[in-house]
Amino acid sequence: MRNESRPKGWNEKKTNDSWAIFKIMGEFVNGFEKMSRIGPCVSIFGSARTKPDHKYYKLAVEVAEKIADNGYGVITGGGPGIMEAGNRGAHLAGGTSVGLNIELPFEQHDNPYIDSDKSLDFDYFFVRKVMFVKYSQGFVVMPGGFGTLDELFEAITLIQTHKIQKFPIILVGTEFWGGLMDWVKETLLDSFNNISAGDMDLIHLVDTSDEVIEVLNNFYDEYQLSPNF
C-alpha cells in the first residue's frame, strides 16, 4: 500500500502558500495604482553600500539631477547608497522621486529623498521588479552587486525575448562594467554564439552624466514614451 504520510506541518504549509496569493495580489494592485500615475521615469540601480563621499555616489546624484531636468522622474530601490543618490538628485532638481522599498534583513532602509506619496514597500522581489520594468523608460545601472546584476540581466532578457518593449539600458562606469562587457562579447557572442550580435546593441556603456542623457534623448527622439507592458 502506498504510504500517504507527509512531513510534519505539510498541510499547514500548503494552506499558507495558498493565502500568500492574496498578499502577492495586494502588492501588485497597490503598485499598479500608485505607479500608473507617476509619468515617464528612469530607474537608477547600484550598490546599497556606496557611501556619500564615493565618486559613484556623487555621479549618481549628478545623473539623477540631469534626468529630472530633462523631464523624467527617477525610480530607485528606495534604500541607501546609489539608490539614495538617485533619489537625492531627483529631489534636488525638483523632479519626481520614487522609492520601491524591499524588506531585507540587512542594508535596506528608506532614504529621506523619496517623495512622501511615492514610497512603496514590497515583500516580494518579483513584484518589485515588475514595477521597475513596467514603469521605467530606461535603466541607468551604476556599479553594484548581485541585486544590481539581477535587475540588469532580467531587463536584457525580457527585451531580448520581446516580452517587453525595448528601452535604453545604460551602464555607467567603464572601469567597473568594461570587463563584463568584454566577456559578454568575447565569450557569449564570439566563442559560444549564445547570443546574437544585435543583442549587444541593447546595452550602452558610458562614463558621464551627459552621455547618459544623450543616450536617453537619442532613443526617445525615435520612440514614443509609453509603459512597457
Image (tube, rainbow, N blue to C red):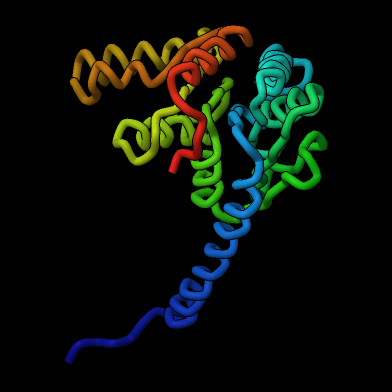
The one of 171 and 116 positioned closer to us in this rendering: 116
Q: Quarter-wise, where is residue 114 in the image?
A: top right
Residue 68 placement, left or right of 199 = right
- The quarter of the picture where residue 64 lies is top right
Q: Which quadrant of the rendered structure holds the N terminus?
A: bottom left
Q: Residue at x 49, y 13 (%)?
A: 218
Residue 123 image position (x, y, % from top left): 60, 55
Place of residue 83 in the rendered image (x, y in percent of width and height, measured from the top left): 68, 31
Evaluate whether residue 128 shows in this view. yes
Farthest residue toward the bottom? 1
> Is 16 situated above or below 24?
below
Identify the residue shown where x is 36% and y is 82%.
Answer: 6
Disc tally is: 0
Residue for point 51% across, 44% down: 129
The quadrant in which the C terminus is found is top left
- Residue 57 visible to the viewer: no
For the residue pair 67 and 113, the one nearer the viewer reads as 67
Task: Give me the residue at 28% from left, 87% from top.
Answer: 4
The percent coordinates of residue 197 (x first, y second) are 25, 16
Q: Is residue 207 left or right of residue 161?
A: right
Would residue 54 be found to the left or right of residue 178 on screen? right
Residue 83 vs 14, above or below: the answer is: above
Where is residue 143 drawn, in percent x and y?
57, 21
Up-down: is 4 above or below 72?
below
Question: In the rendered view, does 226 fall on the left or right side of 38?
Answer: left
